[in-house]
Amino acid sequence: MLRRILAVLAGIIVGSLCITGVENIGHYLYPPPAEAGAGDMNALKVYVSEAPFMALFFIILAYALAAVASGFTASKISNNGKYTAAVICGAIFLLMTIYMMASLPTPIWFWILGILVWGLVFAGHKLALKTNKI
């Protein structure tokens, strides 16, 4: 039981690191205004509503990488062959994604991809099953 809890925590940490890394690349290429980075929610809303497609698509790419990585990590650490730990990671990230999308004026395509992409935790789980045991 403890191993499964640690697997979920590790999956969330790895997924969060993936999101941070890819989003930082996106912010480097498409920098948000300084006010948005300083925690000004209104400035962030304006930026998201006016952001170019690729600025938002980097966030979807971050979610996709995080989904695979968190599913892989959680499944590998839980080491029981079941996808429960990966699904829990995906569900947690999905809830956080929905909260963020509801808080910001994101376009409909972002909603669709933002929800669907978390299904990639199953790809991470399958990949973990195909690699050698740790």
Image (cartoon, rainbow, N blue to C red):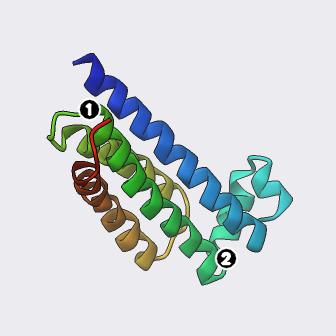
Looking at the image, which residue sits at the far front? Answer: 132
Quadrant where the C terminus is found in the figure = top left
Residue 100 percent coordinates (x, y): 50, 54
User: Which of the pair 18/31 is nearer the observer?
Assistant: 18
- Looking at the image, residue 111 sits to the left or right of residue 37; the answer is left
Residue under the point 65% across and 63% down: 45
The quarter of the displayed image where residue 9 is located: top left
How packed mark 2 is, by other alpha carbons closer than 10 Å (few <14, some 14-19, many 20 or more), is some
Residue 111 percent coordinates (x, y): 40, 69
User: Which of the pair 133/61 is nearer the observer?
Assistant: 133
Looking at the image, which residue sits at the far bottom? Answer: 53
Q: Are marks 2 and 1 in contact (CB under 8 Å)?
A: no
How packed mark 1 is, by other alpha carbons closer than 10 Å (few <14, some 14-19, many 20 or more), is many
Q: Earlier in the sequence, mark 2 or mark 1?
A: 2
Residue 86 percent coordinates (x, y): 27, 44
Residue that numbered label 2 is attached to: 51
Q: What element carries label 2?
A: loop
Residue that numbered label 1 is attached to: 78
Quadrant where the N terminus is found in the figure = top left
Looking at the image, which residue sits at the far right? Answer: 34
- Give the amino acid type for the residue marked by disc 1 in the picture: Ser
- Give the amino acid type for the residue marked by disc 2 in the picture: Ala
The quarter of the displayed image where residue 127 is located: bottom left
